[in-house]
Amino acid sequence: MNTHPQVLDGTGAEISGLSAPAIGTPRTRVEGRDKVSGKARYAGDIPIERLAHGAVVTATIASGRITAIDPSATLASPGVIGVIDHRNAPRVDPEAGSPFFGPDGQLQLLQDDQIAHGGWPVALVVAETHEQARAGAERLRVSYVEQPHDIAFSPGHPAARPALSAFGPDANKGDLDAELAASAVVVDESYTTPAQHACAMEPHVATAWLEGAVLRGIDSNQAPYGIAAQLATLFGKPLSDVRVQVEQVGGGFGSKTGLGPQLILATMATMLFHRPVRVALTREEVFLATSARPRTDQRVRLGADRDGRLRAIGHEAAFEISGKSEFIENCVEIAKTLYAADAIRTRLNVVPLNILPVASVRAPGTAPGSFALESAMDELAERLDMDPLDLRRRNEPEVGPVSGLPFTSRNFQLCLSEGARQFGWAGRDHRPRRRREGHLLIGTGMAGTSFFTTAFPSSATITAEQDGTFTVAIAAIDIGTGARTALHAIAADALRVGWDRIRLRIGDSAIGPAWQAGGSLGTTSWGWAIVAAARDLLEQLESGPALPVSVTSDTTEEIMSRPHRERHSYSAVFAEVAVDPATGEVRVRRLVGRFAVGRVVNPLMVRSQLTGGMIMGLSIALQEEVVRDEVSGRQVNADFAGYHFAANADVPFIDADFVEDHEPDDPLGMKGPGEIGTVAVAAAIANAVWHATGKRHRELPIRLDRVIED
Ligand code: MOS
């Protein structure tokens, strides 16, 4: 349990006399009852008058151009209102994109006849009902000239080039080659990870309509404000004339952080046909036409002295990217932060291919990156004949290993020791293939990670109402993580009142600028804004003004004026596996994770979040992979039958808990527990499979056919 004292001055109990502090108290979701009783409304559930429905038509080729579209059969189909394609679609701003990655060709839907990947949307059929739209879409005849496509990923691809550096430059500390040459033991191995999908339960769905000059949207997304801003730029409107709302989101896992095709196409349709239009992607379209995590190929070089002290860390990663939009899968991030070494060098390259855009998926960068680095650390321990836990204890940096900056709070060692104790690591025989149970091979493995944390500027408005309640408004969104419940607790404590006096309004871009449910920093960023607005409001209330009184506060200045230092969450993960060498089946028997994620607002939900993250990590280790057909260039397994991920029967006992931790540069002491649960698990499992079988798996997923023994 987190026992840090209240960072806010005063406690809820003293001032209001109503309740104990809400932060730190386990609570179930405020919207939980509505969700399980079917009352909660997701983007596709909201009734709208005169609603029409759009169905997407996607390209069947992976490269080339459209030569003709014949809509006659579609237009004759019952209920069809019209067809939009590149010939009649509203023009959009070619420069529209995102603040991190610049202009984004993924947003340029229906603007020309070019096809950049299989699954690219080529038309939208609009009809009175969803079924009629789909039937009309089936009848649309699209002709193409096909050009050769290229989906063959390799780090040495002729088109490979450096990735964007918006998340920091390559590391170039010391002389890597000299340190490797001086090392007693060296590891030089390459690791590959497949493309993966976010796989949110709720498919992407949006409704758009015009209310006078105002473009309204209801959209399943992770960033109401950011997406409204992107939509405004794309369609050349002032932001004040665009409003994007959403009540509940059935998961996003990264795939809903940016403006999605559903909202762009719904907007075009409402502009052309003057009806509210809803576009709900099918599951296949979510796979083909939204985004994925890229394949990666990562060379890791480690050099150490005989006693395990690291001299050299080299991490050179390449990942695939679409020809249409930039992205940074920052696989090399933890190589710059986790361990001390005299020389640290990182490189990050992209390889443009005819694939769908790559974007955030469940711990972008660190999930594949930690698989490579932490597998290599295990290989180094093996070659040193050393306990892999000791190897990690021996390389703890005093300051940022590349930046030289101080850390705020760094509790990696605490995660390692607490995890090891809980797991029962002590006394492990580190040699592989030593434990058997009947025909099964048993092994254990561990890995750790750091995870970047900060807070992003956001604004919140709080109103002190006449009835003694407080309306707290922030353009936050809860994608299923429990953010809404956490913000209730933060607001109650910040205003020093009981939980029942808080009315929270989220999910509406019109409230004002706010960070997204992304980068594990939604609740941290929004929480800070609520704290700031509560502080300013309480100050105003001291003079006893007539109610209601409203205050809007923005955190930009406070966030920018923090000291210059490194901020990270940390974890250590321990796994036990049983491997059947005759079938290749790997069963994970136990997972223990210990996490330093700052102050924990809601222990119940943070444990749930971390447990869920560890299940995703298990899934990444053993099951998940996009399979593309070389001939057609299209994804073969674009459905939940063919794209495997962990379900209940795959999941063992998971013990996820947090260690004492506190972020001094955050007013609530928070760091953000969103994604770190997913990281480090794949390496821990791969290392356990090596310990069980003696075979290294440097390619994910660790499928049956890669494990089976003759
Ligand atoms: Mo997260 S993958 O940054 O939405």
Image: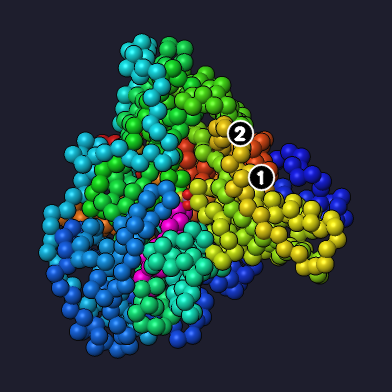
Which residue is at a point 44% across and 74% down the rendered structure image?
Answer: 208
Q: Is residue 106 left or right of residue 475?
A: left
Position of residue 142 measured from the top left corner of the image (x, y, whole percent) = 18, 72
Q: Quadrant of residue 499?
A: bottom right
Q: How is the image coloured?
A: rainbow
Q: Quadrant of residue 192?
A: top left
Whether residue 5 appears in this view of the structure is yes
Q: Earlier in the sequence, mark 2 or mark 1?
A: 2
Q: Is residue 255 magenta?
A: yes
Position of residue 436 measured from the top left corner of the image (x, y, whole percent) = 43, 31
Residue 408 higher or lower than 124, as above or below: above
Residue 448 higher or lower than 247, as above or below: above
Q: Is residue 180 left or right of residue 61?
A: right
Element type where label 2 sits in the image: loop
Residue 528 higher or lower than 448, as above or below: below
Position of residue 324 measured from the top left corner of the image (x, y, whole percent) = 28, 54
Q: CA distance from mark 2 to mark 1?
A: 23 Å
Residue 64 higher or lower than 38, as above or below: above
Q: Amino acid at mark 2?
A: Pro
Q: Is mark 1 within 8 Å of ligand 1?
A: no
Residue 362's label in the rendered image is: none
Which residue is at a point 56% across and 58% down the rendered structure image?
Answer: 513
Task: Identify the residue position indicated by label 2 in the image.
Answer: 563
Task: Identify the residue position indicated by label 1 in the image.
Answer: 600
Q: Amino acid at mark 1?
A: Val
Position of residue 268 measured from the top left corner of the image (x, y, whole percent) = 36, 73
Q: Is residue 371 left or right of residue 249?
A: left
Q: Is residue 692 magenta?
A: no
Query: Label 2: few (<14), some or many (≥20) within 10 Å?
Result: few
Per the rendered image, the range of residues in magenta is 253-266
